Amino acid sequence: MGRVMAQPEARLRARCRMWLDQFLPSPGTFTAIEHGRAHSGTPAQRAREWQRLKAQGVKTGLSDIMIWYRGRFIGVELKAGTNTASAAQEDFGRAMIANGFQWSVVRSVEGLATVLHQHGVPLALTAPHVASGYDRELATAEPVKKNTRRSAKCKPEPSKLAAMARLRRAGVFA
């Protein structure tokens, strides 16, 4: 199994993306974005970067996952642990609801499945079971810190080296 991301909401977003890739029926589509990313640099540099983005129309509060399915828009704000939606996120949710769309705060992959079902998105019978499995993974997986040591490079097997040499001689690649 691969590395586990340290931020709980990032881990939840990754599992929701995996689940949506598998279970959001066609012609549905979605996007997942990370608005809360801390940009690097000094506070002054981050403030200038935010001003640049704001001047281009980037707004705070957009949903972490935005789903479109047969004329429906479903905004999903992901929250892990005891985190709550910010004022900007709540404002976005109210605006979406006032415009006839759906918006929900979700704390699990099962919660995402429930929201889609409540809003009329047909799901495969196995979808809730798989969502529950992802949630169990999230509950048991412990974040790991990034390994700062360089890992040893893997050496290809001799048979693969020989095959690569034959391809090089044949002019397939340099």
Image (cartoon, rainbow, N blue to C red):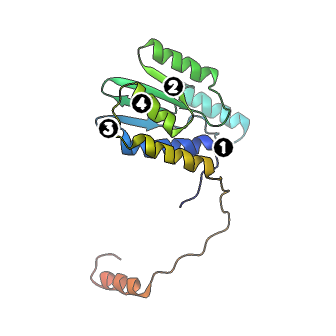
Q: Position of residue 88 (x, y in %)?
A: 60, 21
CB under 8 Å between discs 1 and 2: no
Q: CA distance from mark 3 to mark 1?
A: 38 Å
Vertical relation: 140 (above or below) 39: below
Q: Nearer the viewer, mark 1 or mark 4?
A: 4
Residue name at image x 39 percent, y 86 percent:
159
CB under 8 Å between discs 4 and 3: no
Q: Earlier in the sequence, mark 1 or mark 2?
A: 1
Residue 174 at least partly seen: yes
The amino acid at mark 4 is Leu
Q: Which residue is mark 1?
A: 40
Q: Nearer the viewer, mark 3 or mark 1?
A: 3
Q: Residue furthest top?
A: 98
Q: Residues within 10 Å of mark 1 (few under 14, many from 20)?
A: few
In the picture, the quarter occupied by the C terminus is: bottom left
Q: Which residue is mark 2?
A: 104
Q: Position of residue 76 (x, y in %)?
A: 49, 29
The amino acid at mark 1 is Ser
Q: CA distance from mark 2 to mark 4?
A: 10 Å
Q: Which residue is mark 3?
A: 25
Q: Residues within 10 Å of mark 3 (few under 14, many from 20)?
A: some
Front-most of 62 and 112? 112
Q: Earlier in the sequence, mark 3 or mark 1?
A: 3
The amino acid at mark 2 is Ser
Q: Earlier in the sequence, mark 2 or mark 3?
A: 3
Q: Which residue is mark 4?
A: 116
Q: Position of residue 29 (x, y in %)?
A: 35, 35
Question: Does dot 3 land on a helix, a strand or a loop?
Answer: loop
Q: Residues within 10 Å of mark 2 (few under 14, many from 20)?
A: some
